[in-house]
Image (cartoon, rainbow, N blue to C red):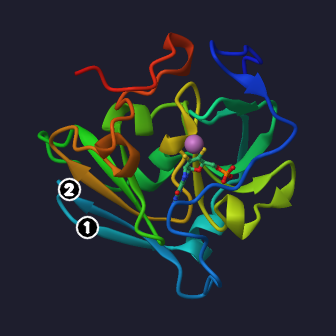
Amino acid sequence: MGEFKMPPGQKPSARLYPISVFGKPKEIDIDKYSVKITGLVKEEKIIPLKEILKLLKESVQFDIHCVDGWSYLGAVFSGIYPRTLFEEVSVLPEGKFVMVKNLDGYSTDLPLDFLLSDNSFLAYEIDGKPLDIANGYPLRLVVNGKYAYKDAKWVVEFEVIDEDIPGYWEKKGYSRKADVYENDRFEKK
Ligand SMILES: Nc1nc2c(c(=O)[nH]1)N[C@H]1C(S)=C(S)[C@@H](COP(=O)(O)O)O[C@H]1N2
Ligand SMILES: [Mo]
């Protein structure tokens, strides 16, 4: 459950502010939408959204912290844990990170063990209602304790990689670790 602890330098926000550097997808074809697991795996896997929606629905309460300084506390997200999708995938021993790729071309990476932990969640609902497209429908990653540039919206691929390769915002200088309670916003030079 969420900690309801305001991290340093953050102010509470009454709502989520839709943020997307490449704009939001206009339409999403639910019938064709799928998630791929690629890269350092024995066999790549394509999982249709329809199969994901049939998996046991779970819920988490994670706070959202944008690195710009607003935090949206207490939302309940429903969906599945990403680790469920990895259950039938054999990750090769050199697989240590995952580049999360999205419909709009945005990307962010996370340590594999973090993505497979209780602190990563793949949501399709917020507070019991389907997410808006602007907030990542049909699949949005929500991470507990990291800034929301790690919350990949419109997830379509998990690419297992062997090193910490920066994604969109990490390339521009934001912290790779992104720990909100450490106030870890910028990558130290
Ligand atoms: N695909 C994609 N996901 C993204 C982004 C983006 O630009 N594209 N922006 C990130 C940032 S910086 C934030 S703060 C959150 C904002 O989530 P919201 O739009 O639901 O408020 O989305 C994150 N996920
Ligand atoms: Mo953000």
Q: From the top left corner, tell me how far across and down residue 62 is, in percent.
A: 69, 32
| Residue pointed to by mark 1 | 44
Q: Name the residue at 34% across, 41% down.
A: 170
The image quarter containing residue 144 is top right
Does the residue at mark 2 contact the one at mark 1 (Cβ under 8 Å)?
A: yes
Q: Determine whether 184 is above or below 144 in the image.
A: above
Q: Determine whether 189 is above or below 33 in the image.
A: above
Q: Determine whether 186 is above or below 140 in the image.
A: above
Most foreground residue, 150 or 80: 150
Three-letter amino acid code at the position of disc 2: Val
Q: From the top left corner, tell me how far across and down residue 185 is, in percent.
A: 46, 25
Q: Which mark is residue 41?
A: 2
Q: Residues within 10 Å of mark 2 (few under 14, many from 20)?
A: some
Q: Which mark is residue 61?
A: none
Most foreground residue, 186 or 46: 186
The image quarter containing residue 157 is bottom left
Q: Determine whether 149 is above or below 5 in the image.
A: below
